[in-house]
Amino acid sequence: MTERTVGGGEVFSGRVFGVTVEDVLLPDGRTARKEIVRHSGGVCVLALLEDGPEPLVPLVRQYRYGAAAETLEIPAGRLEAGEDPEECGRRELAEECGLLAESFVPLGTIYPTPAYCDEVIHIFLARGLSRTEACLDDDEFLSVEYVTLERLAELCRDGGINDAKTVVAAVRTENRVQRTDNR
């Protein structure tokens, strides 16, 4: 069940993404037109600050223009061309939250909107945190809040957090931490 491009091309190229309109050959031999958002991919990091009685997770509160709303989400960023996902995650964690991590564990990838976008987001769990100075991009305005892992799970379940990458990262981290604690 694959589809193969037989025509079309780029119709827009921007700073963050591009758009192509392509004619594809369907499995039954017919052709269809597909509109695809081309994105370099991204990284998100669920960090566990474990120096207190309960692990705390830094969350970033910021206004997201596309959603026309303020969101609460884990630190994340766009991959630069040829950039290693772990390096990107470490950079974003330091820039947005002022945190460095000894351990960066991959928690897999997600396709946020696979019907029309080729973006892949790499998810990491960061541990062994130490503080550094945050250094936001010129167009970034955000604040950092800390919640327990339990509170993060509640916010994800109850709709207090609607950001898909944060919800997936919370579930995968909760599963990983429970498996580790039960050994």
Image (cartoon, helix red, strand yellow):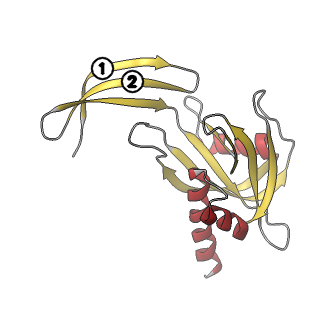
Say left or right for 148 vs 16: right
Q: Position of residue 71 (x, y in %)?
A: 69, 47
Q: Residues under labels 1 and 2: Cα distance?
A: 7 Å
User: Could you tell me which secondary element the residue under label 2 belongs to?
Assistant: strand
The quadrant holding residue 30 is: top left
Say left or right for 22 vs 178: left
- Decide: few, some or many residues near mark 2? Use Cα within 10 Å; few <14, some 14-19, many ≥20: some
Residue in the image at 61% along x and 53% along y: 162
Q: Mark 1 highlights which residue?
A: 8
Q: What amino acid is labelled 2 in the image? A: Thr
Number of on-image labels? 2
- Decide: few, some or many residues near mark 1? Use Cα within 10 Å; few <14, some 14-19, many ≥20: some
User: Compared to 44, does 65 lie above or below?
Assistant: above
C-beta proximity under 8 Å, tags 1 and 2: yes
Q: Which mark is residue 97?
A: none
User: Could you tell me which secondary element the residue under label 1 belongs to?
Assistant: strand
Q: Position of residue 66 (x, y in %)?
A: 60, 35
Say left or right for 141 vs 155: right
Q: Which mark is residue 20?
A: 2
User: Compared to 81, does 128 lie above or below?
Assistant: below
The quadrant holding residue 176 is: bottom right
Residue in the image at 61% along x and 39% along y: 67
Depth check: give the residue in front, 157 or 96.
157
Q: Position of residue 47 (x, y in %)?
A: 71, 57
Q: Position of residue 9 (x, y in %)?
A: 34, 19
Residue in the image at 72% along x and 67% along y: 151
Depth check: give the residue in front, 29 or 154.
154
**Between discs 1 and 2, the one toward the N terminus:** 1
Q: What amino acid is labelled 1 in the image? A: Gly
- Spot the residue most to the front: 68
Whether residue 91 is visible, yes or no, is no
